[in-house]
């Protein structure tokens, strides 16, 4: 289901997600530890904690309904420790059918260069994430090139250049307000001639101009296919975890006009709203491939769903 790096310990993961863990886990822990048996308002308290953790109304209702069905079906005895395990099992079950492959495995299996188009609204950390992803993949041994196709913000182009210099990865750019599809075309041509493994294409994030953005991303895809027929192989949506429920709306908007294949969730270390991970994966069935847990270039980690949920629950009551 999800992949786990052996060197990543549970303690490390807990530390990276401290705010989310403490917000959710401390309230769950307090609820279960101060009760010795199930009473009439216990499930209501669980529902309140789930909702306040930005898991979302739809997913919370699903968890609570399933929990109540299991309690009835399994003739739950009222033991609080059993209920604690049932709650964890129900949350884990939401992810069991979501396939989340290693990106490097997919790159190896495809004819190179492997093209990744990065999408997301302005302000979510998309450009920074591209730099971190370039660093991550370069450490895996891949040769990369970046295309600065967000030509509507000079800051985006400059920021990409700073990151590319730090990672020692070439960046293809044009002047501000240049045609983004033209930048993408030049980048793919350069990638082919240099025999690159991976191409990262930055795009604009002007979601307020939804029609224009939809047409722009569609044009970029069409133009890239003239160079590499399968491009883009992957469309990664970058979301800011600190926005909580707004992240749900961004997913809805983007999947309505592009085929989002995976998600990167940034700024997860700085928010107590990490429950949004559970809601997004349940409602949209799109795998979260990476999480951003800091400002440093190495602060992009492969996401592990089981470990994420484990961090919410202590092993034993």
Image (tube, rainbow, N blue to C red):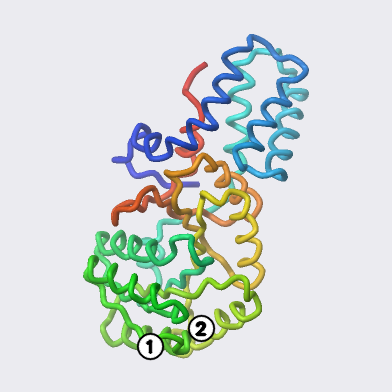
From the image, tell me which residue sits under label 1: 175
The residue at the point 41 percent across, 64 percent down is: 106
- Could you tell me residue 89's position as x and y percent? 59, 32
Please say if 117 is above or below 48.
Answer: below
Furthest-front residue in this view: 154
The x, y position of residue 190, in whole percent, is 31, 86
255 to the left or right of 204: right
Mark 2 = which residue?
220
Q: Position of residue 302 (x, y in %)?
A: 39, 51
Q: Earlier in the sequence, mark 1 or mark 2?
A: 1
Given residues 312 and 287, the one toward you in this image is 312
The picture quadrant where one finds residue 182 is: bottom left
The residue sitting at 64% across, 74% down in the picture is 210
The residue drawn where x is 55% and y is 85% is 219
CA separation, marks 1 and 2? 17 Å
Asked if 300 appears above or below 17 in the picture, the reply is below
**Left or right: where 23 falls relative to 143:** right
Of circles 1 and 2, the one toward us is 1
**Mark 2 and mark 1 in contact (Cβ < 8 Å)?**
no
- Residue beneath the point at 71% across and 13% down: 77
């Amino acid at each position: 289901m999800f992949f786990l790096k052996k060197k990543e310990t549970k303690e490390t993961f807990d530390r990276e997600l401290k705010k989310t863990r403490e917000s959710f886990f401390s309230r769950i822990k307090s609820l279960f530890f101060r009760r010795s048996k199930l009473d009439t308002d216990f499930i209501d308290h669980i529902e309140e904690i789930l909702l306040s953790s930005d898991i979302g109304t739809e997913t919370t209702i699903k968890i609570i309904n399933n929990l109540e069905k299991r309690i009835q079906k399994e003739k739950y005895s009222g033991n609080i420790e059993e209920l604690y395990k049932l709650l964890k099992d129900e949350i884990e079950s939401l992810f069991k059918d979501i396939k989340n492959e290693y990106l490097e495995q997919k790159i190896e299996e495809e004819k190179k260069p492997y093209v990744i188009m990065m999408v997301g609204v302005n302000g979510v950390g998309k450009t920074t994430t591209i730099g971190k992803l370039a660093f991550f993949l370069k450490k895996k041994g891949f040769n990369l090139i970046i295309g600065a196709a967000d030509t509507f913000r000079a800051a985006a182009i400059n920021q990409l250049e700073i990151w590319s210099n730090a990672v020692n990865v070439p960046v293809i750019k044009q002047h501000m307000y240049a045609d983004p599809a033209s930048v993408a075309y030049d980048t793919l041509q350069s990638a082919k001639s240099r025999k690159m493994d991976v191409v990262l294409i930055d795009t604009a994030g002007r979601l307020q101009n939804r029609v224009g953005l939809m047409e722009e991303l569609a044009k970029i895809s069409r133009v890239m296919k003239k160079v590499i027929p399968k491009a883009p192989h992957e469309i990664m949506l970058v979301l800011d975890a600190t926005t909580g429920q707004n992240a749900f709306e961004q997913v809805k908007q983007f999947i309505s006009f592009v085929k989002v294949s995976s998600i990167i969730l940034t700024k997860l270390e700085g928010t107590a709203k990490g429950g949004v991970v559970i809601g997004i994966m349940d409602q949209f069935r799109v795998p979260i491939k990476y999480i951003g847990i800091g400002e440093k270039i190495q602060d992009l980690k492969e996401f592990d769903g089981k470990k994420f949920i484990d961090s919410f629950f202590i092993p034993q009551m």
